[in-house]
Image (spheres, coloured by chain):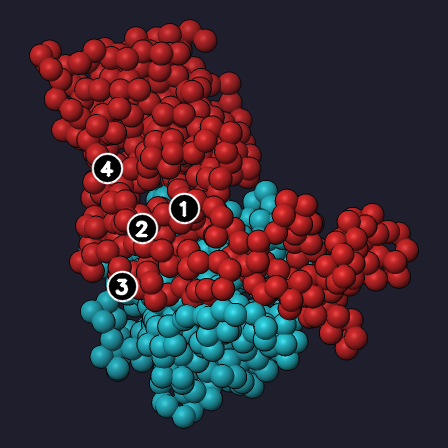
Amino acid sequence: MIERISKWLLAQAPQWVEHPNWLIRRTSQLTVLGSLGTRITVHGLGHPLDKEHEKHEQFIESFATSPSLRDYVQARRPLQHRIGVLARTLLLLQGADARLRELARSQQSTFALKIEGRLDQRVLRNLLIWHNHVVRSSFDDREERAIDIALVLASACGDERRVFELISASFMLEQVRNISVFWGEESVDLAVPTLISNTAPDCQRARREAWDLGRTPVDLVDYVTRRGTAGGIKVVQDARKRTQDFFKTALLGQVVIAVSLKEDADGTVDPTELAWLLHALDTVVERHSRLGFVILNRLAPSRWQRWPAHIRFARHQGFSLQDAISIAQFADGYIGVLDIFGLAANAAARPGIYVPLDEGELLAPPAVEHSPAVVKDRQVMLASCDRARIESALISFLEDLGRL
Amino acid sequence: MTLLSRLLKNSQFSARADKSALLAIIDFSYQHYALGDLLTTQVNLATRATEQDLRHIDVVAMVNPKFPSTRYQPFITSANYITHLDNIMAVFTCNPMLRSLQIVRDVRTFNLIVLSCHVAGAPMSPDLETHLAMRQDYPVNHHMLNSFYARRGYLPELRAPHDLEAWARDFHRSELGGRPFAVINPRQSSLTDSPAVTYRDAPLDAWYRFLDAVGAHRPEFMFVMVGGFQEWEHRLLHRRNVFVPRASGLTLAHELALMKIADLFMGTSSGFATFATFTRVPYAILNVQRDFAQYAGVNPDDRHYPFARANQILTWHPETTEELLQLFDEVLAKSADQGGSSGDRAPEPDQANRWKAVAQ
């Protein structure tokens, strides 16, 4: 009987909870929450629901984001405050209940990513490779699953000073919802409180093998280096705005090429690589003054000098890592290594010259000294760190872009 | 909580949580994205954990993308909350007892964590009742800290963001030439996208004269200007004795790490000043708002917080060049008396008079 009434009330709810009449609106909202409380009292947490009820759950959940609920909770009037807290208590239970059901029926949603040793440019790149080619490839194409990641900083003596960059990049991954960071493997199990209901198994604590971000399989790195990647990055909206503002104010009318080079251990650009690139660009820039280059890596302050007008350092103009990723995705072209910036540019189909981060990571070519470049949609995947080859590809690519 | 207990009475389940750790909830639907308040919260959490003989703190920061901020920060929206969140990530890792950090963007997961902790009877801050009531006073007061200090004679100290103190020492040696340095933060809210109480902004001309005066007499002394990229004038970069971390691609995390090893901090009462407040860094915190005295448990015009050292000084009015120079000398001299770091050097006896002349 209670169930029938509750079902009927829930079916009616959507049309009443936003009724213009205050009394009807509030009464129906309380009724919906009351029926929720009744269900949990009768069935307990984690009790499976049919599709119709699941739909209603999402509807109830939208109450949690209602500014008027917050107004009630934070109200000075005791009655309003009590009603608000009551509603919030029920919504707390509803959320926990829904998550328990989700855990019981869904596939793996939390993935552990281990970082042992130095957290560097390679680890940041491997995060995107893992996201695009390990996790996403395991999903059904039509599935838009949100996943949670647990970053496990396993080594006490590892250099993890770039952990904040790893978190920043994780915020931009399309599938990633919740991000946890654990210092030490032993804390993974201890730090997260869990609830085990009679109807839902203990899915929260189920141990999964961690993926080592420092040791991505060679064949996967080789595949991505030769063929690139697609999607995976959700551009932060205000980062996109800042990027466009930057292009329009600092590089107005120029053909913008994003650049990323190998970094030193401290996360700053390798000065030898930079010197070589600038030298290589000199001749092209003389012929094509519309080309403007935005270097996405940081530069050590002691290396700072007066740079030619066609060279900008985004990170030195107040842009964050997320902004720099956005610049890679919106520039007219990209040249540089396949690090997180290179992959972001590649994923956004930016034309460019893409060079391996480390040739030693690739599978050995069978007979030839250097495997041929893969060219698709003006994206040249060089799969070689040979400077003569890079320079020749670079000049030809920039000559083309310069004619734009 | 009687209601919750009644609702859960018939449900058969068990909960597990580590009772040797404090679960710290930062829910941005009612808590602020504010450097100072979040840093004070970290020290509050550490004192609470210490009082309860707990060994660790597990921080859970909740942001609902559809409801990302309090009513007082309406400029933080679904479209830009990631930038704001990303900016303050380092703050959580300044917590001296941090074991894990969870950034949750899904209400269901968050509610399950909170409920599990409550059912397991594990320590949580704020407690469930306060969390459900969305109760958070601003600014975060020092009452608990003052009473902890009164009883125990010390306060938990904020640490540099994770793993960055070693970076800061390397950086100081390699990029700043190991020179003695002060971290400065003259407030400039009027230069930001969301200016607020701009009458509290620092008088920059006074600061420029101060920097030049020190530069003339102590050219080896560096000033590291911290704060958002928008919060300084370009003229600052013309000075040889000034380094701006944000103009070198560094972030808040790097700035806090540099502060931790600085010879002194001088700046307006704000987020960076809060970091200094809860470390051993010698400081002069300037132009503290008189209203804040009640939250800090002091009287307006008091020169020190109850838990401060002799070289940690407060002022309660807008600064002048002369006062900046005097404070600079005083803080360094007191630090030298206490056996400060190698960067500290006591000023010469007639220094104060010379500053006066320079300032004029």
Compute the Cα span from label 1 to label 2.
Answer: 9 Å
Chain of the residue on which disc 1 is drawn: A
* Other-residue count near label 2 (Cα within 10 Å), few / some / many at <14 / 14–19 / ≥20: few
- Write down the colour of chain B: cyan
Determine whether B203 is above or below A128 in the image: below
Q: Which residue is mark 4?
A: A216
Tag in front: 1 or 3: 1
- Write down the colour of chain A: red
| Same subunit: marks 2 and 4 | yes
- The quadrant the C terminus of chain A occupies is top left
**Residue at point 44%, 24% (across, down):** A348
**Amino acid identity at mark 2:** Arg
- Taking the view exactly as shown, the residue that stands out farthest to the bottom is B151
Q: Which residue is mark 1?
A: A108
Whether residue A241 is visible, yes or no, is yes
| Same subunit: marks 3 and 2 | yes
Q: Position of residue A339 (x, y in %)?
A: 30, 32
Q: Secondary structure at mark 3?
A: loop
The mark nearer the N terminus, 1 or 2, is 1
**Amino acid identity at mark 3:** Glu
Determine whether B337 is above or below A229 in the image: below
* Other-residue count near label 1 (Cα within 10 Å), few / some / many at <14 / 14–19 / ≥20: few
The mark nearer the N terminus, 3 or 2, is 3
Q: Secondary structure at mark 1?
A: loop
Compute the Cα span from label 2 to label 4.
Answer: 17 Å
Whether residue B272 is visible, yes or no, is no
Quadrant for residue B163, please give it.
bottom left
